Image: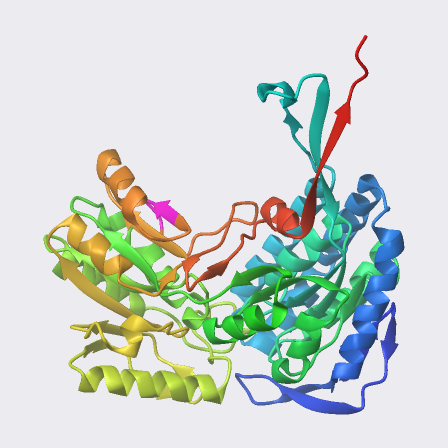
Amino acid sequence: MRKKWQLWIGGQWREAKTFEPLYNPHTNEELAEIGQAEPADAELAITNAHEAFQTFKSHPAHARAEILAKAAGIIEQRSEECAKIIALEGAKSIRNAREEISRTVQTYQFAAEAAKSNYGEQIPMDAAKGGENRFGFTIHTPIGVVTAITPFNFPFNLVAHKVGPAIAAGNSIVLKPAEQTPLSSLLLAEIFQEAGLPDGVLNIIPGKGEVLSKTLTGHPYVKNVTFTGSVEVGHIIQQQAGFRKLTLELGSNSPLIIDEGADLDNVIEPSVMGSFSYNGQVCISIQRIYVHQSLYQEYLDRFIRRTKELVIGSPLDEKTNITAVISKKSLDRLQSWLEEAVKEGAKIEYGGTVEGNIMVPTVLTNVNRDSKVFRSEIFGPIVCIFPFDTLDEAINDANDSRYGLNSGIFTPSIERAFYAAQRLETGGVIINDIPTFRIDNMPYGGWKDSGVGREGIKYAMHEMMEQKFISFKLNEH
């Protein structure tokens, strides 16, 4: 792996004026120097993308599909190398990193299939008076330059959820990866070049969001902005983007309900993993668990017992479950929120301590509903567990949030499952599994402050296209 990375613009590496060191969050070792794009670089990337789009929008669907399939194959061939990059720059356990790469390969394969499945709709024109002797239909056309701003937690797969559908639709793209995990994105430059993607269709410009945001969201050539990150930044992007098409995947504090009669043998393992996988740094990580009073104490005891078995260690160790959180800033915030919660009445049932850059998985009970660990997105290894008496009580508590991305419920009753599914105020309701469940072809997006628009390759592709209606008036005989 090279030690100094430039900017990828117009199919070539461009010299950056400044560089910043990239550190391994677990060891604090310097990994590389990363070129930092400035607004002029972003404008150059957008201009190159715009010029490339003029040709690429006519690239046939089968050719776009072939490029995406080749990229998927290259990533699969280099899977161990890619997984190690995730582990080094993001401190994700190597097992979780391999799972991410496997999903990334599948995501680009879905994108290849979607490129060949761009269907319109026939409109029954004669259903309306005056529509006789007319033939109408819709088509979806590429929109133009897409700018993508991505987070650190899934640096290959969440990038794939933006790059894949953009290319499948026939668009060009300018990608600004997360400051903490740029290497995963920069590697895509050579992967897509090898796959045969025309120069300028994919441009990759690492840098600081506050420096590049206005250009990436407001340049006249930009037609679509797709962002995954915090609610606060999402609101800024929404204001900057104006009338451009937007996909915003924002915050969450996912609830899980353990209903009366649920089989705890099937619940404990997924709920622990859904709370602490990648140290809770997952958009749909479980943050609030509601357990029926009849199961509460047994569930709590078994949950804590399993949490104690999680292995804390190096990301490169095959046995590791828990590693360093992404930054010292994040660790300080988690400690501050935890201390505040305890002052407001929360009880630490397990964890709460820090070892180097690692926070030991933390289980809280008796949490005040006004505490940040309840109201805000923790994005760390902290989970809050509550008892409930009635399903309506649990649903109302779950809905008591500014967020609404995914929710989950374990229940043996199909009637109660449908009852909850209709009333939970989230973009996805996962029955008899955790809200952290996601596969890459399903629609994915939130209600309320969790965002606008939908990902999931086919759905994201349509977000990145314009619908056009075409009508033929037939000659009368």
Colour setup of the view: rainbow
User: Residue 349, position in %: x, y?
Assistant: 20, 75
| Image quarter hosting the N terminus | bottom right
Note whether residue 231 is visible. yes
Chain part drawn in magenta: 429-433
Q: Quadrant of residue 331 in the image?
A: bottom left
| Image quarter hosting the C terminus | top right
Image: 376 above or below 65:
below
User: Residue 382, position in %: x, y?
Assistant: 32, 73
Image: 356 above or below 406:
below
Seen in the image, is 70 located left or right of residue 371? right
Residue drawn at point x = 33 percent, y = 53 percent: 425
Of residues 275 and 269, the one drawn nearer to the viewer in this rendering: 275
Seen in the image, is 428 located left or right of residue 5? left
Of residues 185 and 316, the one drawn nearer to the viewer in this rendering: 185
Q: Is residue 96 within the magenta segment? A: no
Residue drawn at point x = 19 percent, y = 87 percent: 343
Q: Residue furthest front?
A: 130
